Amino acid sequence: MAFEDDVRTAVSTYLDAVANGTSADIAALYTDDATLEDPVGSEPTVGREAIEKFYSALDSVPRRTELLALKVAGTTAAFHFRVVTEAGGQTVTVEPIDVMTFDEQARITSMRAVWSPADMAVTSGEQ
C-alpha cells in the first residue's frame, strides 16, 4: 500500500500544481520521456519540455481544481476532477477523467485525459 499512497500523493500534488503552479511546476512532475494525450485521440505530447509547453496556456489564467474521485491500482491512477479557468470574461469548467501511470518514484510516465469539447461548460461573466 505504500506505493499506492505515493501515487495518491502524486495525484494531489499534480492537481495542486495545475491550480496554483506554473507550467514548469506541472512538467516537473513528469519523467523526461513521459507522454501526454489530452484529450484522448489527440496527437500525444512527448517529453518534459513539450509537456511544459502544453501546460503554458495555464500560466496566465486564474484556475482551480477539485478532486471528485480517485482510484489507484499498482502503478496506475484514474481520477475524475473538475478544473475551472477564467479568461476573457468567461469561466470554463471541464470535468475530465485522467488516467496516469507512474514510475517507481511516483513520477508521471503517461497521462491520458478523457474528455471532449462537449464536456466543457462555458459561462460569461456578464450574467
Image: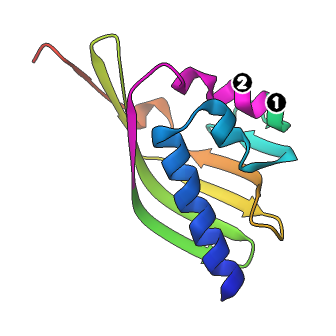
Q: Give the residues in magenta.
A: 50-66
Quadrant holding the N terminus: bottom right
**Tag 1 near tag 2, CB within 8 Å:** yes
- The answer to whether residue 106 is left or right of residue 84 is right
Q: Which residue is mark 1?
A: 49
Q: Residue at x 41, y 33 (%)?
A: 118
Rendered view: 31 above or below 24: below
> Height in image: 52 above or below 37?
above
- Quadrant housing the C terminus: top left
Rendered location of residue 11, percent (x, y): 58, 60
Mark 1 crowdedness (10 Å alpha carbons): few <14, some 14-19, many ≥20: some
Residue 64 quadrant: top left
Label 2 Cα crowd, 10 Å radius (few <14 / some 14-19 / many 20+):
some
For this orientation, the residue located farthest to the right is 33
Residue 116 visible to an observer of this rendering: yes
State the CA–CA distance, disc 1 to disc 2: 6 Å
**Residue sitting farthest toward the left:** 127
Which amino acid type corresponds to the residue marked 2 in the rendered image?
Answer: Lys
Q: Is residue 125 above or below residue 5?
A: above
Who is closer to the viewer here, 24 or 44? 24
- Residue 20 spot, x, y in % from top left: 47, 39
Q: Is residue 40 visible?
A: no
- Residue behind mark 2: 53
Say which amino acid is labelled 1: Glu
Q: Using the rendered view, name the quadrant where residue 24 is placed.
A: top right
Instruction: Say which residue appears at 82% left-offset and 65% top-offset.
Output: 103
Camera-nearest residue between 21 and 109: 21
Residue 103 lies in the magenta stretch: no
Residue 89 appears left or right of 103: left
Image point (68%, 58%), residue name: 100
